[in-house]
Image: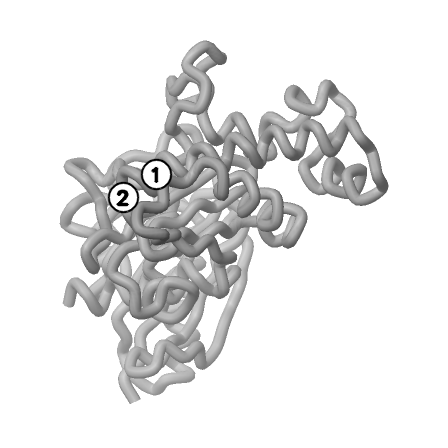
């Protein structure tokens, strides 16, 4: 059995999977705290934890294994490190994973990896054109175009949360005015909800309880999301649009029903063609599987 290890290095937890590369089947999983900011000498603690996970899976598999790793930030084109990740994940920038782990290791942006997981074994399987939005604290994204991951010149492609919905609004953390991220991401919910809701989940609870103010705030955000998706459909012409992340999982039909309704008014559908809007299927395993798929594609 051909096996590989997929690592999804997040700000809070490191998720890992031992994967059968022939079937995309997950054979075993692990999750350990990232401990961002902790170091052993000059080595970030999360790197030592990743190495421990690799050795643990190799003991289980009885062989030395290749590793695919995803992390926040812009990945170097050679796939050996994250080139740019300011402000957090201290020690991640320029950390050369193949050298540290002493084996073949391919590194990818975490949102790119999540989409590749869905392409390999999830909601975008057997498609040639798709894009993904992940709704959480912010809004992430990635693009699958013509059967390949769109990375761009410096790995920046797919930052779909940083497109402009309102050019007259304030700039977000990436200097984008009126971004999609600010329109629906959890980090702006206090502002959008006039201080009434601490989180998007609290907003959704109020919505379910019949709160008219919550309904107005939520439907405004969903309308912005629909406008963004319709615009991206015009640019990318996908077969499938995948919507994932904690907000999408928590909202369920409260997101997808009004989103579909708004898209009926916004989406250009020449010849009756309509892009499918679907929830992500793989959840927390998407990044691990996508990291392995990226490894296989770049072997």
Please say if the residues under marks 1 and 2 sit with CB atoms less than 8 Å apart. yes
- Could you tell me residue 131's position as x and y percent? 35, 49
Q: Quick check: 177 left or right of 224?
A: left
Q: Give the residue drawn at x 19%, y 65%.
A: 297
**Does the image show residue 148?**
yes
- Could you tell me residue 98's position as x and y percent? 22, 58
Q: Give the residue drawn at x 22%, y 47%.
A: 150
- Circle 2 is placed at which residue position? 236
By what rule are the colours in the image chosen?
one colour
Q: Quick check: 259 left or right of 253?
A: left
Question: What element does badge 2 sit on?
Answer: helix
Quick one: 40 or 225, which is closer to the camera? 225
104 versus 250 height, above or below: below
Which class describes the residues within 10 Å of circle 1: few (<14), some (14-19), or many (20+)? some
Identify the image quadrant of residue 88.
Answer: top left
* CA gap, disc 1 and disc 2: 6 Å
How many numbered callouts?
2
Looking at the rendered structure, which numbered label has been put on residue 87?
Answer: none
- Could you tell me residue 81's position as x and y percent? 24, 47
Q: Give the residue drawn at x 29%, y 64%.
A: 127
88 versus 5 height, above or below: above
Looking at the rendered structure, which numbered label has been put on residue 232?
Answer: 1
Q: Give the residue drawn at x 19%, y 55%.
A: 146
Question: What element does badge 1 sit on?
Answer: helix
């Amino acid at each position: 059995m051909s096996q590989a290890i997929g690592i999804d290095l997040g700000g809070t937890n490191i998720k890992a999977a031992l994967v059968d590369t022939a079937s995309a089947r997950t054979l075993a999983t692990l999750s350990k705290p990232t401990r961002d900011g902790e170091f052993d000498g000059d080595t970030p603690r999360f790197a030592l934890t990743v190495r421990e996970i690799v050795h643990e899976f190799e003991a289980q598999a009885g062989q030395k294994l290749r590793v695919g790793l995803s992390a926040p930030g812009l990945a170097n084109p050679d796939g050996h490190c994250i080139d740019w990740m300011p402000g957090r994940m201290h020690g991640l920038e320029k950390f050369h994973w193949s050298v540290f782990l002493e084996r073949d290791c391919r590194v990818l942006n975490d949102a790119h990896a999540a989409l590749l997981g869905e392409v390999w074994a999830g909601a975008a399987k057997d498609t040639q054109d798709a894009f993904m939005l992940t709704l959480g604290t912010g809004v992430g994204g990635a693009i699958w175009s013509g059967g390949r991951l769109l990375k761009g010149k410096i790995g920046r492609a797919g930052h779909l949360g940083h497109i402009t919905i309102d050019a007259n609004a304030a700039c977000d953390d990436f200097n984008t005015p009126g971004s999609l991220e600010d329109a629906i991401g959890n980090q702006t919910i206090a502002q959008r909800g006039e201080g009434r809701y601490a989180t998007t989940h609290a907003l959704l609870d109020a919505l379910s309880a019949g709160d008219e103010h919550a309904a107005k705030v939520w439907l405004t955000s969903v309308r912005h999301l629909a406008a963004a998706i319709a615009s991206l459909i015009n640019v990318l012409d996908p077969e499938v649009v995948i919507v994932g992340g904690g907000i999408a999982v928590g909202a369920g039909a409260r997101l997808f029903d009004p989103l579909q309704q708004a898209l009926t008014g916004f989406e250009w559908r020449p010849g009756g063609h309509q892009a499918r809007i679907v929830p992500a299927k793989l959840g927390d395993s998407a990044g691990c599987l996508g990291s392995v798929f990226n490894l296989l594609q770049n072997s």
